[in-house]
């Protein structure tokens, strides 16, 4: 492009002074040399200079393999959130992993990670996401009859409430069939902060709903002030209504067949429950107990390490709807920033946040998810011994390359197929150590340079068609070098969470 610009300056003066026929010859030669469109070439020669210099964009940032490898690890540790949610989480997640000894980054790499934009994160993880696979569509929950004894509250009637007003819903784990008895999940979502709590119900029964509300009320760090549900008969009954009246909890319901009135909790049904648990059928006490164990770890991971969007405003201009969102934040951050939150609650939440290890929580979730899959897919009813979860160091190491295997959550992963092995012999099997020694001595060498050196050392042995094989191997070696530069060789043991914290 710089040569084209110089050619424009050289020919523009002669082009303006020439006649019609001479201009045609100059224009033909200029178009043949530059490849420009004829009309564009005429405008350039008449102007004599370009308004903008051609060439690479000045000041554009570039991120190397080290930043990308660290970004993939942090993306896996965040349970694969999008770039817009991962961007505000990076300082929190990076500090937590460094505090627990899971990550040790050079200053230059750490600075680039904290300054990377959400769009660049999505571009850097594009190939990784494609290899890891997409997510499934969520199923809609059923609705039930209306109970006129409970007042109606619509989506627009909340008016920015303080923390403590929850929307509630049930998620069915019946799999492909709703026949018989199976486990349900009671989901509570706070309107102000997005704080989400889940509890399994062995069956759909109103006394179990009240018991779950009591247990979740003890786990939630702030007081429950309101309870808003749909028109399901498991909520619209005297048992639940009397419990809310006795606890001074405002009990409301949405309009029948208007699921947008409960948009806050409906979004969590897919983003939290279905994402973590999946769509298999769970029945029996063993599945309910395992599901309770999974929610015990997931409540800390979701509320402390999973940023989410919150709608700020919505305006309509004819048929167009414009939505404005607050910056992504975790429920913990919103709770601490809310002016209605008492000081004692702030101290309790801050103290709890310093004890949490996101990698350990994710490891516990993955192990429990695998156990749920084994229970749901068990062909014969029996008592199986639960497999021990992998060590934390092994799980942390697996996060670096987890995207190669596709879907990481066992509850959402399809049946694995055996991989096809190598069908041809390795052409570099006898010289592999020598090639690696050449690479280690000078990692800046290209694949072509190494191949030329190999052909010089072994004439008429390695044809040019094997260059691509060497280039792929060189790419893997460079990736190993980047990992060794970023990740520590050993990871110190991390203490378990507080006893009873996940109860």
Image: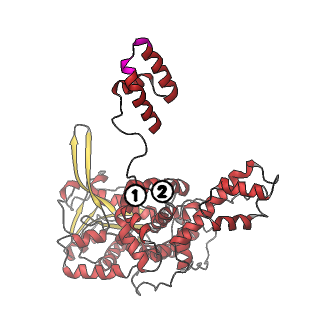
- Can residue 197 be seen by looking at this rendering? no
Q: Which residue is mark 1?
A: 83
- Judged from this view, the residue extending furthest toward the right is 460
- The image position of residue 167, as x and y in percent, is 28, 64
Quarter-of-image position of residue 200: bottom left
Marks counted in the figure total 2
Q: Nearer the viewer, residue 145 or 100?
A: 100
Mark 2 near mark 1, Cβ–Cβ under 8 Å?
yes
Q: Residue 125 has which mark?
A: 2
Quarter of the image that includes the C terminus: bottom left
The magenta span reads 15-21
Where residue 333 appears, as percent x and y from the top left, is: 28, 70
Q: Secondary structure at mark 2?
A: loop
Q: Quadrant of residue 354?
A: bottom left
Specify the principal SS of the magenta part.
helix
Q: Does residue 193 appear to the left or right of 441 in the view shown?
A: left
- Is 258 placed above or below 380 here? above
Q: Residues within 10 Å of mark 1 (few under 14, many from 20)?
A: some
Query: Is label 1 in a helix, a strand or a loop?
Result: helix
Instruction: Pick whichever of labels 2 and 1 is earlier in the sequence.
Output: 1
Q: Is residue 400 visible to us here?
A: yes
In the rendered image, residue 17 lying in the magenta stretch gets the answer: yes
In front of the other: 205 or 248: 248
> At x 45% / y 34%, what residue is drawn?
4
Name the mark on residue 491. none
Separation of disc 2 and disc 1 at Cα? Answer: 9 Å
Q: Is residue 191 left or right of residue 391?
A: left
């Amino acid at each position: 492009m710089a040569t084209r610009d110089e050619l424009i300056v050289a020919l523009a003066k002669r082009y303006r002074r020439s006649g019609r026929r001479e201009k045609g010859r100059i224009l033909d030669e200029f178009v043949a040399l530059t490849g420009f469109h004829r009309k564009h070439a005429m405008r350039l020669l008449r102007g004599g200079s370009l308004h903008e210099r051609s060439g690479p964009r000045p000041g554009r940032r570039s991120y190397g393999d080290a930043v990308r490898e660290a970004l993939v690890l942090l993306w896996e540790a965040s349970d694969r959130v999008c770039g817009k949610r991962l961007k505000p989480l990076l300082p929190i997640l990076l500090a937590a992993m460094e505090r627990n000894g899971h990550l040790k980054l050079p200053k230059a790499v750490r600075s680039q990670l904290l300054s990377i934009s959400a769009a660049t994160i999505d571009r850097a993880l594009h190939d990784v996401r494609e290899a890891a696979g997409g997510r499934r569509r969520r199923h809609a929950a059923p609705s039930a009859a209306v109970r006129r004894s409970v007042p109606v509250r619509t989506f627009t009637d909340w008016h920015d409430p303080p923390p403590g007003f929850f929307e509630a819903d049930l998620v069915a784990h019946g799999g492909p069939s709703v026949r018989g008895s199976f486990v349900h999940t009671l989901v509570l979502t706070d309107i102000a902060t997005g704080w989400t709590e889940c509890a399994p119900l062995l069956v759909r029964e109103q006394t179990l709903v009240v018991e779950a509300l009591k247990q979740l009320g003890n786990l939630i760090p702030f007081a429950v002030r309101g309870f808003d549900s749909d028109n399901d008969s498991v909520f619209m009954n005297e048992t639940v209504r009397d419990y809310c009246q006795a606890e001074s909890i405002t009990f409301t319901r949405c309009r029948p067949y208007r699921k947008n009135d409960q948009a806050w909790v409906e979004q969590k049904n897919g983003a939290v429950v279905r994402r973590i648990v999946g769509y298999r059928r769970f029945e029996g006490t063993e599945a309910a107990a395992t599901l309770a164990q999974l929610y015990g770890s997931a409540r800390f991971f979701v509320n402390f390490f999973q940023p989410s969007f919150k709608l700020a405003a919505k305006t309509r201009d004819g048929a167009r709807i414009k939505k404005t969102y607050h910056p992504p934040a975790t429920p913990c951050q919103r709770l601490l920033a809310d002016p209605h939150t008492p000081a004692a609650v702030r101290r309790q939440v801050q103290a709890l946040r310093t004890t949490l290890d996101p990698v350990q929580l994710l490891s516990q979730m993955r192990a429990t998810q695998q156990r749920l899959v084994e229970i749901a897919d068990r062909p014969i009813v029996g008592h199986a011994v639960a497999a021990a979860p992998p060590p934390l160091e092994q799980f942390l190491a697996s996060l670096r390359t987890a995207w190669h295997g596709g879907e990481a959550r066992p509850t959402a992963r399809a049946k694995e197929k055996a991989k096809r092995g190598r069908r041809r012999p390795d052409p570099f099997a006898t010289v592999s150590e020598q090639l690696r020694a050449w690479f280690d001595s000078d990692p800046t060498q290209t694949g072509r340079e190494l191949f030329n050196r190999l052909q010089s050392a072994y004439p008429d042995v390695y044809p040019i068609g094997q260059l691509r094989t060497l280039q792929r191997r060189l790419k893997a070696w460079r990736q190993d070098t980047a990992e060794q530069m970023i990740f520590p060789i050993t990871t110190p043991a991390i203490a378990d969470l507080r006893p009873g914290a996940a109860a």
